[in-house]
Image (tube, rainbow, N blue to C red):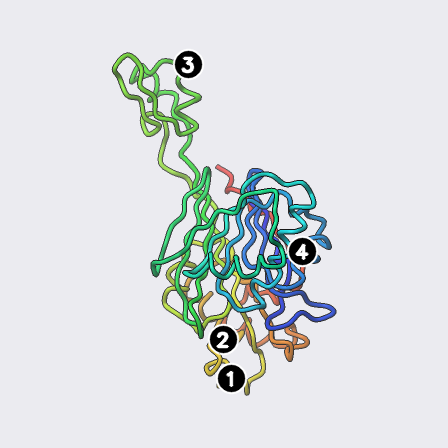
Amino acid sequence: MLDVSLLGTGGMMPLPYRWLTSLMLRYQGKGILIDCGEGTQIALREKGWSPNPIDIICFTHYHADHISGLPGMLLTMGNAERTAPLLLIGPKGLVRVVNALRTIAPELPFELRFQEITEPEQVISFDGFWLKAFKVNHSITCYGYSMIVERAGRFDKERAMEQQIPMKLWSRLQKGETIEQDGVVFTPDMVLGAPRKGLKVTYCTDSRPADSIVANAEDSDLLILEGMYGEADKLSKARENKHMTMYEAASIAKAAKVPELWLTHYSPSLMRPEEYMGDVRKIFPNAVAAKDGRTVELRFEED
């Protein structure tokens, strides 16, 4: 099961009823936060989730509304007596930007580790899942992220018995371990069927429509995109500032053939995003004008 919570849906500045855009994912005890604008830790508290289980913080880019909440988040983690290392992932310049922000959070009881993204597409693997960063089209270097949870095939008892694989090794092979015993190497593919459908969530804010978004959104169970503007007269402004309209986001979701789209990162001038959803759904019917705290539990398909 993969928990997905859009903690805030605002762009540029927080509002009394809308925190800045931030996404929290939880899988098998690990927490992944994508973006950390001002007020993110308050949004997290309102959701009822703790910052302590956050293992990874990813940044799409280094505009203030996506990273200015980091010092407070780090201090909160430190005050909660965290000692486990925290991995930070982001575009080139990550170390310089974070260290500048740490001027007001200089002493922490845990280690910060850094993974800079330097390629147009970059994959970072973890135990049980992986993150893929892909470059998008904003006024500064900016990346979207997909989180992918793979699912191995079902255990095939008959194949294991036909190959005379010792029963005591079955469980370890089923968990993905490669084992050498008495000069013989046993691999998981010897006892597992074809891989089953896993889980995938793709998140992108602050970009013009781009082929990279469509390509990386394919096969996603959920696509979360910025819908900065809904007003018909804001397309030229979206182009000028390298942002996206709600209708452009809907067109991307349609092209990527995803089952569901959440819109986020609204302009402060977009007071009631839901008022524009009639026209948005003419392009992509299963679009949602997400509000702060919107959450879903994604589960593997039944066999």
Q: Which residue lies under the disc numbered 2?
A: 243
At label 1, the amino acid type is Lys
Q: Going from the N terminus, do you reach mark 3 or mark 4 first?
A: 4
Which residue is pictured at 43% across the width and 43% down the height?
197
| Mark-to-mark CA distance, 1 and 2 | 8 Å
Q: Going from the N terminus, do you reach mark 4 or mark 2 first?
A: 4
Relative side of 125 to 291, left or right:
left
| Mark-to-mark CA distance, 3 and 4 | 46 Å
Q: Is residue 284 above or below residue 126?
A: below
Q: Tell me, for residue 168, which label it has, or none.
A: 3
Q: Going from the N terminus, do you reach mark 1 or mark 3 first?
A: 3
Mark closer to the observer (2, 3): 2
Q: Which residue lies under the disc numbered 4?
A: 41
Quarter of the image holding residue 218? bottom left
- The reply to whether discs 4 and 1 touch (Cβ–Cβ < 8 Å) is no
Q: Going from the N terminus, do you reach mark 4 or mark 1 first?
A: 4
Tell which of 253 and 29 is nearer to you: 29
Mark closer to the observer (4, 1): 4
Q: Which residue lies under the disc numbered 1?
A: 237
| Mark-to-mark CA distance, 4 and 2 | 25 Å
Tell which of 254 and 84 is nearer to you: 84
